[in-house]
Image (cartoon, helix red, strand yellow):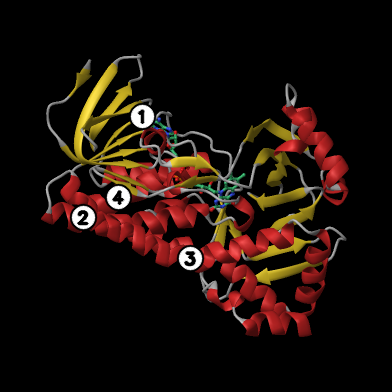
Amino acid sequence: MRGDASRRDVIIVGGGPAGSALAAFLRQRECDVLVLDAARFPRDKVCGEAVSPAAWPLLDAMGAAPEIEARRPHPLRGMRLTSPDGTSFQGSFPPQNRPGFALRRRDLDAVLLRRARTLGAEVRERTRVTGLLRRGDVVEGVEAEGPDGELHRWTARLVVGADGRQSVVASRLRLRRPHARLCRFAVRGYWEGMQGLGHHGEMHVGGGGYCGIAPLSPTLANVAFVLPRHEMAEAAGNVEGFFRRALRCRWPRLAERLDRACLVDRPRVIGPLAVEARALVAPGALLVGDAAGFYDPFTGEGITLALRTSQIAASVVGEALARVDVGEGLLAPLRAYEHARRAATRDKFRFNRLLQIVVGCPDAANFMARRLARRPDLADQLVGIAGDFVPAGMALGPRFLWDLLMA
Ligand SMILES: Cc1cc2nc3c(=O)[nH]c(=O)nc-3n(C[C@H](O)[C@H](O)[C@H](O)COP(=O)(O)OP(=O)(O)OC[C@H]3O[C@@H](n4cnc5c(N)ncnc54)[C@H](O)[C@@H]3O)c2cc1C
């Protein structure tokens, strides 16, 4: 058993966008941070890989924006949505803002983790956290397996679960549960040579679910579709065959654009996607990013949300650690994170739930699409809400609904 005797301020389990951002923001407050990630970076992550313009101020704040810009990610100027009957509408991001972008997660996440390291976080890759150390109810550290299978123990004043949808930290604390209703899976593949790619992300509703496209270059596309579990049986044993067949049969208009394209890498499947967390803080522990819950990728906001909520967490944790040492005493100040996160996401999550009702009902999706095609201003608003730079409350009020019905 290895480890080291010194107690850290914070151990962050997971070095994805949430963990890296939290580490960077905590380092800016001079906290002593250890980040543990099971993977070796750069690593892949199944994702639509479209990042909203709203991420830029957060990337600026953590000092990661210049390196991301240096990678020349494919600019995204808005979203184009297509309903089951083929009606399309397009919403654009405000032209005066920096555009959104699409970038492979293996590149984006490596930049973010490197930024945390540059700011002084200690980062250990290929180190899988397997359990929590506790004194009574209070989390005091983690147990982990290192690159050669060796066991480690580290202690800290606070352990943060930034370990994604399958969070070990949330599971060990019994805070994680599958979503009560949503049980969906995603399949993602890359196509080189796809026709008709531009500077808009695409979302095609229909085929029993929906299919998103993020152009990573003028010819390379991230194509990811989401289906309910009962539609996934055929994927067993042959994900690539299922991926090709599903695109052909469920989204034939897309399949035409893939006629001369070739699949790069093997498609990957993940799911069930939706998970809930019963609480976001516990004595000595806190959850950020997908570990704090994940609903559905339709609005493609997970990365921005992870960065934003990690910034909130860093400010609460930084202040709490300056005042209180550890344990139960730390719990009350950390509750401020739970409240601030809820306040920052409440309207958006309501909006997402409403959107899911529309997406699940082809007639409603067609109706909405026809109206929005006639009102580009409302389409811009909707895309702005999905992208997190227009307040979601705007679409929840009677005015928006009225405008939509009258369009
Ligand atoms: C199909 C799909 C499409 C999506 N499309 C988009 C999109 O277009 N745009 C967008 O913004 N968001 C999108 N999202 C959401 C986005 O991918 C997530 O919200 C985002 O990755 C959350 O970041 P995170 O850091 O919380 O978790 P993750 O990115 O999952 O990172 C978790 C990290 O923890 C590590 N880890 C896990 N377990 C352990 C362990 N036991 N010990 C140590 N390390 C561990 C993993 O190796 C990983 O590096 C999509 C999600 C899905 C499923």
Which of the two labelled residues, at mark 2 and mark 1, occupies the earlier sequence position?
1
> Which amino acid is tagged 2?
Gly
Q: CA distance from mark 3 to mark 1?
A: 34 Å
Which image quadrant: the N terminus?
A: top left
Task: Write down the residue under mark 1.
Answer: 125
Q: Is residue 384 left or right of residue 318?
A: right
Q: Residues within 10 Å of mark 3 (few under 14, many from 20)?
A: few
Mark number for residue 148?
Answer: none
Question: In the rendered image, which quarter is residue 184 located in?
Answer: top right
Task: Write down the residue under mark 4.
Answer: 24
Which of the two labelled residues, at mark 4 and mark 2, occupies the earlier sequence position?
4
Q: Closer to the camera, 180 or 319?
A: 180
Q: Is residue 13 left or right of residue 252?
A: left
Q: Helix or strand or loop: what does disc 1 sit on? A: loop
Place of residue 376 in the rendered image (x, y in percent of width and height, measured from the top left) = 72, 78
Say which residue appears at 87% left-offset and 41% top-offset: 249
Say which residue appears at 76% left-offset and 55% top-offset: 204
Task: Write down the residue under mark 2.
Answer: 318
Of marks 4 and 2, the one in the foreground: 2
> Which amino acid is tagged 1?
Glu
